[in-house]
Image (cartoon, rainbow, N blue to C red):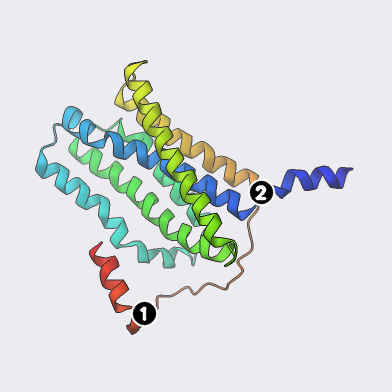
């Protein structure tokens, strides 16, 4: 009986469930940040088009530097790096409302963006490792669907918080970031460290035949 209960407690803690929850956690913060940032920057930080352009440029710097994640893998596992990245995303989002200034928004955006882009890099790698070829099409659809539902939920809760409860930007940003942080804490404490099925290279390598993919990714 004890073995049966132990099996029931652990059988749901699968790599797929973890990927779904991580996708949900990411969207709860990122969708909140994205939905409010233009109004917040203009109304509270007096941003003009020039500052908004610089803000979006800063947001893309971690995406351009995402290849540096390979060096962080010398210090930690991919699963750990994915959770740390979500932690940064949640913290950056939660702090956004407390820094309604030009420098403050640049800094919180950079923190949020590092978390977002490094999570996306690890998420793609972990999905390819943890999901079999037979499982991948259906599982990836479930992961994307969960993220989309989380984004819709975020937009709906923002509208309710704004119109019904009159909450401020600060409260909504804290709510989105805190939701992500709570999921990260649950994943950290409630899930095991899944074994790496493939030994990962800890260095960069390029292939000439993939030049078009590299070019498109760079321009994106």
Q: Which badge, 1 or 2, is on the more N-terminal residue?
A: 2
Q: Which mark is residue 48?
A: none
Q: Judge by depth and name the residue closer to the eye, 93 or 74.
A: 93
> Where does the image place residue 186, in percent across and percent down from the top left?
58, 40
Q: CA distance from mark 1 to mark 2?
A: 35 Å
In this picture, is 134 found above or below 107?
below
In this picture, is 107 found above or below 16?
above
10 Å crowding of disc 2: few (<14), some (14-19), many (20+): some
Residue pictured at 23% horizontal, 31% vertical: 40
Give the left or right position of residue 171, taking residue 123 as reference.
left
Tell me if I can see residue 88 in this picture: yes
Residue pictured at 55% horizontal, 56% vertical: 138
Circle 1 sits on which residue?
206
Residue sticking out furthest to the right: 1
Give the left or right position of residue 1, taking residue 100 as reference.
right
Tell me if I can see residue 76 in this picture: no
In this picture, is 11 found above or below 102?
below
> Where does the image place residue 56, in percent across and percent down from the top left?
21, 48
> Where does the image place residue 152, in percent across and percent down from the top left?
40, 36
Quadrant position of residue 174: top left
> Where does the image place residue 37, in percent across and percent down from the top left?
25, 36
Circle 2 sits on which residue?
13
10 Å crowding of disc 1: few (<14), some (14-19), many (20+): few
In this picture, is 72 found above or below 6?
below
Q: Judge by depth and name the residue closer to the eye, 17 or 68.
A: 17
Quarter of the C terminus within the rendering: bottom left
Residue pictured at 45% horizontal, 47% vertical: 86
Residue pictured at 45% horizontal, 33% vertical: 178
Secondary structure at badge 2 equals loop
Give the left or right position of residue 11, taking residue 3 as reference.
left
Secondary structure at badge 1 equals loop
């Amino acid at each position: 009986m004890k073995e049966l209960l132990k099996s029931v407690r652990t059988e749901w803690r699968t790599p797929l469930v973890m990927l779904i929850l991580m996708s949900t956690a990411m969207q709860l913060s990122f969708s909140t940040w994205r939905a409010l940032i233009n109004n917040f920057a203009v109304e509270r930080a007096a941003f003009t088009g020039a500052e908004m352009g610089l803000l979006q440029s800063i947001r893309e710097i971690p995406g351009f530097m995402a290849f540096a994640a390979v060096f962080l893998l010398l210090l930690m596992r991919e699963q750990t790096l994915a959770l740390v990245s979500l932690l940064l995303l949640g913290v950056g989002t939660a702090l956004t409302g407390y820094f309604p200034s030009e420098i403050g928004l640049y800094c919180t955006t950079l923190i949020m963006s590092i978390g977002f882009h490094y999570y996306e890099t690890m998420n793609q790698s972990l999905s390819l490792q943890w999901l079999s070829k037979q499982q991948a099409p259906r599982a990836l659809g479930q992961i994307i669907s969960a993220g989309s539902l989380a984004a819709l939920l975020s937009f709906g809760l923002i509208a309710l918080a704004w119109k019904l409860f009159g909450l401020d930007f600060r409260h909504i940003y804290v709510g989105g970031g805190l939701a992500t942080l709570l999921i990260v804490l649950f994943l950290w404490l409630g899930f095991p460290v899944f074994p790496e099925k493939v030994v990962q290279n800890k260095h960069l390598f390029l292939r000439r035949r993939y030049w078009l993919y590299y070019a498109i990714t760079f321009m994106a």
